[in-house]
Amino acid sequence: MPASDGFLALPSRCSKPRTQGITHIFDKGLTLASIEGLYEVAGDYVDVAKLGWGSSYITCNLAEKIALYRSLETPVVCGGTLFEVSYTLNKIDEYKSWMSAIGLTHVEISDGTIDLPRERKLELIADFARDFTVLSEVGSKDAEVIFAPYEWVKWIKEELSAGAWKVITEGREGGTAGIFRPSGEMRSGLVEEIAHEVPINDLIFEAPLKAAQSWLIAHYGSDVNLGNIPPEEALGLEALRLGLRSDTLKAILVKE
């Protein structure tokens, strides 16, 4: 049983399948044995597994991985790069058929690298949402591209209205773009503006590094949705959520 059910009376956490407090891991090529090992120690805390970039297209054991994650009650989503490649090559219909054939129920729709007109992106979100659970993503993978907070808010709201289940705020796997500066420092003013204007439960903040995870949990609570989490950090992130690490102990457990 999760530690939150024990004698410490830690913050209550919903059991899987969760719609808030989501931990979205970034699978860059885990073996089946590695996935089993992860779930042995932290399976209660993993909600979505993203197969990084376009790697799912060339993964040797893709069918077995999807089947394993499904048996562990964890939906799998391909990285948004595979969607962007499919769009660039005019293969969107083929991409949808491929995902259906391999049993995927979730899709990431992003435009962090390509030029995708806003109206077309919204059309695609609505189209995919008829058959898949859509996680759309806002923000550029180019660290030099900076959008105003009002643009982020406008785009996020549009994508939710178009049918996205959650909107991901870009951070890359290293926390160096989107809601982060190239140095890794969070653009805290941007995040605060987004969170002020959009229901926090509708967002997944990409936060691969502990400093960002701690800041987001301290500001928005244990049930903030966090993405691009290295699999080996899933248990550590849950400890942060519950105040079981010094970084969040006071913010989560000390009542003023």
Image (spheres, helix red, strand yellow):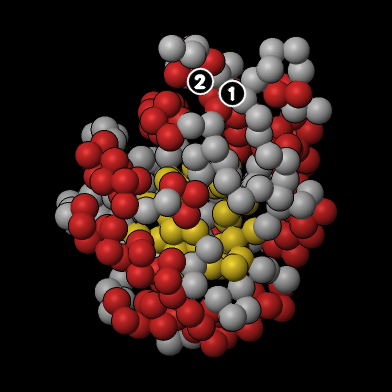
Q: Amino acid at mark 2?
A: Ile
Give me the residue at 79% from left, 49% from top.
72
Quadrant for residue 122, please give it. bottom left
Q: Which mark is residue 242?
A: 1
Give me the residue at 57% from left, 54% from top.
50
Classify residue 189 as left or right of residue 174.
Answer: left
Q: Farthest front residue?
A: 256
Residue 182 percent across, percent down from the top left: 23, 40
Residue 58 seen in the current view: no
12 lies above or below 178: above
Residue 150 percent across, percent down from the top left: 20, 57
Quadrant for residue 243, please give it. top right
Quadrant for residue 212, please give it. top left
Residue situated in front as seen by the camera: 141 or 235: 235
Which residue is disc 2 drawn over?
252
| Crowd around label 1: few <14 · some 14–19 · many ≥20 (10 Å) | many
Q: Amino acid at mark 1?
A: Leu
Label 1–label 2 contact, CB within 8 A: yes
For marks 1 and 2, give the CA distance. 7 Å
Q: Which mark is residue 115?
A: none
Task: Work out whether mark 1 precedes mark 2 in sequence or the reverse, and give the earlier one.
Answer: 1
Give me the residue at 58% from left, 56% from top.
51
245 lies above or below 202: above
Residue 235 percent across, percent down from the top left: 63, 28
Residue 153 seen in the current view: yes
- Secondary structure of residue under mark 1: loop
- Secondary structure of residue under mark 2: helix
| Crowd around label 2: few <14 · some 14–19 · many ≥20 (10 Å) | many
Which quarter of the rendering shows the C terminus?
Answer: top left
Classify residue 53 as left or right of residue 235.
Answer: left
Which quarter of the rendering shows the N terminus?
Answer: top right
